[in-house]
Image (tube, helix red, strand yellow):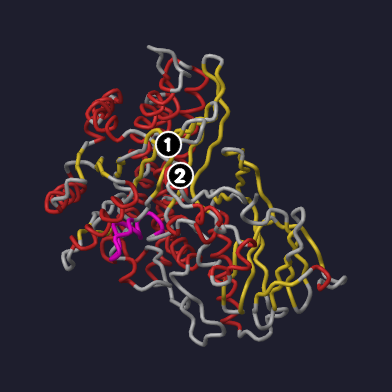
Amino acid sequence: MALSFENLKLHTTPERFYVEACDDGVEDVLSIDRVSTEVTLTVKKDIPPSAITRPIYGILGTIRLVAGMYLIVITRRKKVGDLLQHSIWKASDFDIISYKKTMLHLTDMQLQDNKTFLAMISHVLSVDGFYYSNSYDLTHTLQRLANTSPEFQEMSLLERADQRFVWNGHLLREFSAQPEIQKFAIPVIHGFIAIHSCSINGKNFDWFLISRRSCFRAGVRYYVRGIDSEGHAANFVETEQIIHYMGNKASFVQTRGSIPFFWSQRPNLKYKPKPQINKAVNHMDGFQRHFDSQIISYGKQVVLNLVNQKGSEKPLEQAFAQMVSSLGNGMVRYLAFDFHKECSKMRWDRLQILVKQVAETQDDFGYFLVDAEGRVVMQQDGIFRSNCMDCLDRTNVIQSLLARRSLQIQLQRLGVLHVGQNIEEQVQFEKVYKNAWADNANACAKQYAGTGALKTDFTRTGKRTQWGLVMDGWNSLIRYYKNNFSDGFRQDSIDLFLGNYSVEEGYSTSPLNVQADWKFLALPIIMVVAFSMCIICLLMAGDTWTETLAYVLFWGFASIGTGAIILFNGKDFVDTPKLVQKEKMD
């Protein structure tokens, strides 16, 4: 039975929104007063015949902007597949509907701000990766769901959800306060889901990959690093791999998250801004809170720190190692692996050094297994917590290797793989497996860094390629631009969506009315002129006098541009967030 209504119709009148549940045998209708904003239950006969009607696929929630309240609904969806006989959907289009019938009550400034806030909400919704189910709890792992009470199973999806992964939790706050209307609410996760029906040796099984991004300390690459005072890590993602064969279900869970102490890496036009460790705070309080919560959720922790052990990343590695040592908790083990050093000169086979190094620990941790009779055969007793600087590219490569090793063991135990067979030899399945993990990498990277992942050529093919290096360079260039010139808006959008910033209806002073420094406005001109000189130089090459003049002009303007950046400080040119106070960002 569905734990939330699946088939809905939205009826709109000037006074109310009516959301009608159209599931079999259901008569419930949700009534939303567009003036008082009161939300109540009513019946179908109360829906006026004059109402404008259209189908919708779920209520994402409500939010207050300058003009007043808005209702956000899912208007288009795509079926990803069936997970253990439950339909899984990706929400692909949304509508943001104003309670107000007119905007005449707004000043010009308020009207412009309201448009900007709407653009922010639309931006978040445009980022691919919102998933939901009307009958399955996507916020929990198989192991967590198996260790629950019968009362838990009867709760609504909203009430029982793991709040770390409910991205529309703020939007559904009114629904959370009224249990009688919660079946109209759909908790939505953000991340990635792949569902594949596979066959090895003529034996059919289902293979799933689910990544759940945490909405705590969520944000974009350079504006959200480290942890907050509660121990929530930036870019924290729980990734679960599931197989279903002949009624048997197996699950292997890993996590990733930013290095869990207080540090920052603010954009300043440099390709890689230098990370800064906050020297004015007690790191151990937040550090301990982080690992205390991780141990409660997952058991033993093996930290795989993949950052460089030289250069600007070295102090972070040293500090992380020192803090784990100071923590003195036998449940937390630290292992540093300099990914770039070990795999330099295309020696990607050396990743097996790390896999073999943790193999015994991985065997001890095990995986979660339920047999066809529903009996829990095995629990996963520990977890690998991987990180690099962004917890994207290097991290995803390592996670895919550890997941493959676990899958090898599971498929052998269930009799899908014969003795002596390896997954790598199963060509068709290997293609599915590698592409899904590469797609997972791209999804997580786009959501955090704004572009697809790097190093996905290795994940897809098992080897590094020259074309892969070219694509990495292109993605790095796009990341550079977005991180410096558009991430302030992206960060504000996420903070508004998640409720880290709340809009006051009809305010008099705009939080968005921050005048851009003339130096910020001058930078694009400098860049255009320098680029133009470069083109002139190329076009005029071959004529000694004109070539010399072109070089003089080009290097002259390039020097002016470089001097301007040095003189004014790169931070003056960067697009910074406007909505959340500095202490929330540090």
- Seen at 47% across and 31% down, the residue is 371
Can residue 529 be seen from the camera position used here?
no
- x and y percentages locating residue 148 in the rendered image: 45, 50
Q: Amino acid at mark 1?
A: Val
* Up/down of 72 relative to 404, above or below: below
Which mark, residue 376? 1
Q: Is residue 223 magenta?
A: yes
Q: Main secondary structure of the magenta part?
A: loop
- x and y percentages locating residue 178 in the rendered image: 58, 71
Q: Nearer the viewer, residue 450 or 401?
A: 401
Q: Are the residues at dot 2 and dot 1 in contact (C-beta closer than 8 Å)?
A: yes
Pick the quarter of the image with the C terminus: bottom left
Instruction: Give the residue pinned by disc 2.
Output: 146
Report helix, strand or loop for mark 1.
strand
Q: Which residues are magenta?
A: 218-233
- x and y percentages locating residue 343 in the rendered image: 26, 29
Q: Is residue 102 left or right of residue 332?
A: right
Q: Nearer the viewer, residue 286 or 466?
A: 286
Q: Quadrant of residue 58?
A: bottom right
Q: Nearer the viewer, residue 558 or 150?
A: 150
- Seen at 79% across and 74% down, the residue is 13
